[in-house]
Amino acid sequence: MSSRTETTENFPVASFLIAPRHRPTVLAFYRFARAADDIADDPARAADDKLAALAAFDAALETGEGPPEAVELRLALLAREVSLDHPRHLLQAFQADARGRPCRTWSDLVAYCRFSAAPVGRFLLDLHGEDRAAWPASDALCTSLQILNHLQDAKADWQNLRRLYVPKDWLSQADLGERDLLAPRLAPALRAVYDRVLDRVDELNLQAMPAIKDRRLRMETAAIHAIARHLAKRLRRNDPLAARVAPTGFGKIAALLNALAAGIRA
């Protein structure tokens, strides 16, 4: 069973900033994603069993019969005329997780995030009727958040699931391997690899504020962007192998102030 809920993610899920008419659909999307992710992350299930269960989620999006989370989301998206492609793309990432494919290069990691993260932002933009010209900036923000999450959890991902989301070639160039992620603390060479990843995350965050017309979604996005920048700084200053690095209360307050500022702007 997952230890995460909509209240324990790094980012707000259907927070008070989202208009009430949109929150049920956002929560349906979250429940779908969490249920499918929990399947892919279950260490007790064989890969073939995971893939079969994820295929049932995909079939339910098409037919309306199957796992309740998928059926619920299908009805919600059809009612709002939002594409079913967004959750289907998420399922492709979960299928890759079930197969245990490592991210060998930075390009592999970004390609993985194109399915594991970008569909979430695209779904929110479509739900709010935003122009798809905002997709590239949204993709950058979602990719940033996903990679930050991988840096937070790299030790547990390798220890529990044998998953690698730190570019393998960057580890090799530093004479490191996956087992170095299991150390009690970051060695200097691994710290340098983490900082190299964070340099790329900082570049993504510079591209990561889409032009959004809906005032409340603009505020939500500004808060998430602030959390991404805050978490990137904390991961530079702290050791995620020694203890999980999470947003602080101060960081969350700063995110709220960013949201309010975004709401004031026209």
Image (cartoon, grey):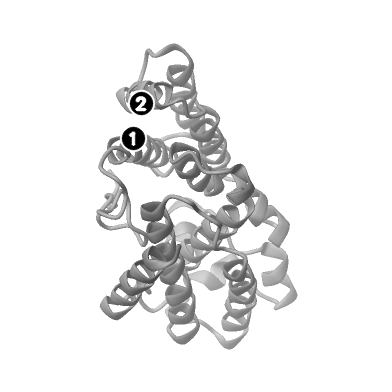
- Residue at screen point 45% across, 39% down: 40
Using the rendered view, name the quadrant where residue 131 is placed.
top right
- Residue at screen point 42% across, 44% down: 41
Residue 9 relative to residue 50: left or right: left
Nearest the camera: 174 or 19?
19
In the rendered structure, which disc, 2 or 1, sits on the residue that comes first in sequence?
Answer: 1
| Residue found at the very far front of the displayed protein | 266
Q: Which mark identifies residue 25?
A: 1
According to the image, label 2 marks what residue? 76
Using the rendered view, name the quadrant where residue 110 is placed.
bottom right
- Residue at screen point 39% across, 55% down: 215
Residue 110 relative to residue 73: left or right: right
- Callout 1: SS: helix
Task: Identify residue type, mark 1.
Answer: Thr
Which x, y percent locates residue 208?
Answer: 57, 63
Task: Identify residue type, mark 2.
Answer: Ala
Which x, y percent locates residue 76?
Answer: 36, 26
Quadrant, the C terminus: bottom left
Q: Check contact, mark 2 vs mark 1: CB within 8 A.
A: yes
